[in-house]
Amino acid sequence: MVSLVTGVIGVGIAVLIIVLIRKDRLHAHHGLGWILVALGFALLGLFPGIIDRLAQNIGIGYPPILALTLGISLLVIKILLMDIERSKIEMRNQRLIQRVAMLEADLKNVKSGIQKTDKAQPKP
């Protein structure tokens, strides 16, 4: 019964992620990874013998440890990817701030040049 509930939860989460992608609440690039995780969750929930056989083939005596280790590993990888993405965004924002500052300085110079030109010309 627990495996059926786990499988249904996994399929439900996959459907929810697809709906979020379609409504532009979640970027497709990020959603694809979450769909794979949800489908893996559903697969292991509906067919719990897979993890038992895999653990036995690897030589792990207690199969749930394999599932926990894989889950923690996936979470660590996801956090690392999120940090890399955040770092890229921070660098882009810093460069954008610098470009805006340079454009504002150029605009200020152009305005002061126009004002000097207007003052230098005699009025008719």
Image (cartoon, helix red, strand yellow):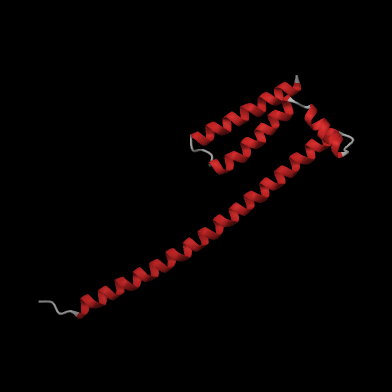
**Does residue 82 appear to the left or right of 73 in the view shown?**
left
Residue 79 x %, y %:
67, 47
Residue 93 left/right relative to 62 = left
Q: Which residue is pictured at 52% across the width and 59% down the height? A: 92
Q: Quadrant of the N terminus?
A: top right
Please tell me how many numbered marks the rendered image carries.
Answer: 0
> Is 96 rendered above or below residue 106?
above
Residue at x 47% of width, y 65% of height: 98
Give how far across and how far down residue 26 sits, in percent: 54, 39
- Please determine whether, in this image, residue 33 is positioned above or below residue 99: above
Q: Percent from the top left, x then y, of residue 93? A: 51, 58
**Which residue is nearer to you in this view: 118 or 5?**
5
* Residue 5 occupies quadrant: top right
- Horizontal relation, residue 93 to residue 118: left or right: right
Residue at point 62%, 35% (across, down): 35
> Which residue is located at x 55 percent, y 60 percent?
91
Q: Quadrant of the C terminus?
A: bottom left
Q: Is residue 108 above or below residue 54?
A: below
Looking at the image, the residue that sits furthest to the top is 1
Q: Residue furthest left?
A: 124
Residue lying furthest front = 57
Place residue 47 in its image quadrant. Answer: top right
Residue 117 in which image quadrant: bottom left
| Residue in the foreground of this view, choosing between 29 and 118 | 29
